[in-house]
Image (spheres, rainbow, N blue to C red):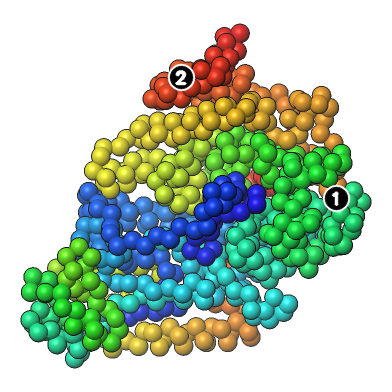
Amino acid sequence: MSKILVVDPDKCTGCQICSMICSLTHWKECSPAKSNVRVFAIRESGIDLPVVCMHCEDPPCMVCPLNAISKDPLNGAVILDQKKCVGCKLCRTVCPLGAIGVDTDNGKMLKCDLCEGIEGGPQCVKWCPTKAIDYVSAGVPTLAWSRWKQALLKAKEQTGPSLSRQPRPQPKGEADGAF
Amino acid sequence: MLLATVIFTLARAAGKTAIAAVLGSKKLKAIAVRGTKGAKIAQPEEFMKACWELRERAKNDPLYEGHSLDGTPWWVSDNFMKAPQYQVPGVERLLSVNINKYSAKNLACFGCALHCSHHQVVTGGKYSGTAGEGVEGNSVIWGGFEPRIYNPSFVIKYHVLCNKLGLNLDHPGVAIAWAMELYELGVITKKDTDGIELSWGNEEAFLEMVQKIAYKEGFGEVLDGFPLRAAEKIGKPEAWITATHGKGLYWLHNDSGVTTSLVWTLGRHVSTRGVDHLKASPGTSSYILGADTLRNEGQKRYGDPEVLLDPWPQSIDRIDRQARFVYDKENLMYLCDMTGICKFWSETCMFVEGVHLSDFARLLSTATGLNYTSNDLVEAAERTNAIQRAYNAREGIRRVDDYPHAFRWLKERGQPWPGLGAQPPNLPTDLATYDMILDAYYKYRGCDVNTGIPTKQTLERLGLEDVAKDLMKRGIVEVANEGGNK
């Protein structure tokens, strides 16, 4: 296992581009319902949480009675073979993250395959505007590091000039008061 | 209620023209939609490539970074406060950086990489506990500048309250500010306002009034009808002077409608739904971009480097080019509305590197598999405008309704619009130039110059024969054509 997916809900804006691009890549259609990434939002509280398969080391979903789910020894991806799947939904029941969906067209299961065979790796990572979903080396403590950095910068903000939020360049207005 | 809006996703609204009042009159409370199917894309690879390229290109636009991080307050309200009437102490508290101090995180609408919206949380002070999405430049204008309340947490409170009550957030702000102006002038008193002291900057009175408007209680019912019905109810000359409008829709109260920029004045007032920035909005380019960029773009698009810089031109050629500019911008706005592409992504906002007309054609062609050209899209936009203008014509809207308030006043009453209170100084009063650009605009739109109604030929060229027939049956189009021949 060399690289892992990392999700940071603080960075997620809830735009759902990940779901759109996932379904577009896999099924040639824009359909969040058929995506392997689902974004759960509680807009009243400003919470957006992308849920994606974490490709567990010991995947509970491999309980599959028809052995439709297997683990790729090279990149650690847990792959579901829809040809073998009968749609019993056992994998969905046991998944601790709720990362397995149902194909609304044929009733079989849907699951992230780390964009196997697609150039550029996981497309949700490539397209995410804020890097709320990232695909990084397993040894890099990204999430912890970004949280620590935020905390440090916030502390610095109270004592000195802010690094996190540089003042934006002011527009160079020629015709002031155009309203 | 005349300012009811259709709210969706908690904080986004179809507002301004009281469309929800129409739904309400049909006893329709809400529509719940949940989708389980997708939209098939005809050429997915090409479509994804087009989306990716447009997204990366837009990052080079001068507006991208500021808009993406701080949203519309950055380029709307930060520029708004440069206007001469807002040079007052405390106004800097409404700068976007001060408003976004309350921002917990950026939010995006569905499928948008620009994420210009914010989740704002107020933790402390009078409005502690207020939280909600999406304070826009307009919330700052109508909940800050207009009632002269220079308090960023109040702006958030006002914005969230409007969303909760289902109000169009522009309307209560401008109506209450208008009442405040009348109150300060002594035209209305506490007796009219149900005992509320509507003085400038009074936050409590303002919030109470918003509630009253929402529930149509007492003076709230009067303000619900701003501008024309409210002025009628108050019935005093000062009320008529300050309740300014275009086609019955408000902009800022006590605003003559004329600005320092001719294109902006025209763009606002030829809007088919009443004075509005969402149908043409040519102003963005003139007050955000630097002079060099505007010269380049002017030369590239219209062969005249000064066309986008000249605020109030006098030469007929340049006036014609500016009319063309408004026409182009308006077409783009119609295309945004038709395709569902955000106006902020398009050239409307990101003038230099946003989605241009040819990009609309590319996106539509790859997504649908039909071969759209730029000309097809312009024709579709023209058709939209023609049918809206034809509808307006049927309801009695004519050339005089495309005038700014002050010019209309002059035309109808034969004397200049007096204005009251704080007026922006040195505004043009040049009706002749406005008439010239309006004529040029009507020619581009294929409208009769005397009435502003689409001609029979225009309607037939756009495939709207049935509309032409209907207007002829009512005697509207023939009148227009006769007028055109004189």
**Residue B442 picture location, percent across and down:** 56, 24
Instruction: Determine if marks 1 and 2 fall on one subunit.
Output: yes
* Residue occupied by mark 1: B182
Residue contact at pointers 1 and 2, CB within 8 angstroms: no
Identify the image quadrant of residue B433: top right
Residue drawn at (37%, 57%), measured in percent from left and top? B56
Residue at point 86% right, 47% down?
B421
- Which residue is under mark 2? B469
Q: Which residue is nearer to you in this view: B366 or B224?
A: B224
Total marks shown come to 2
Q: Residues within 10 Å of mark 1 (few under 14, many from 20)?
A: many
Asked which quadrant contains residue B48, the reply is bottom left
Image vertical order of residue A100 relative to residue B318, above or below: below
Residue at the spot x=77%, y=31% of the render? B409
Of the two numbered discs 1 and 2 on the same chain, state the one appearing first in sequence. 1
Q: Secondary structure at mark 2?
A: helix
- Which quadrant would residue A18 be assigned to in this image? bottom left
Q: Quadrant of the C terminus of chain B?
A: top right
Nearer-the-camera pick, B315 or A131: A131
**Residue B72: where, in percent of width, then height?**
57, 58
Q: Residue furthest right?
A: B186
Rendered location of residue A85, percent (x, y): 11, 74
Q: Position of residue B176 (x, y in %)?
A: 76, 55
Q: CA distance from mark 1 to mark 2?
A: 47 Å
Residue extending farthest top: B486
Kind of residue indicated by mark 1: Leu
- Left or right: residue B288 compared with residue B53: right
- Frontmost of labels 1 and 2 is 2
Whether residue A17 appears in this view of the structure is yes
Reply above or below: B314 against A118: above
Residue B250 numbered tag: none
Given the image, what chain letter belongs to the residue carrying mark 2?
B
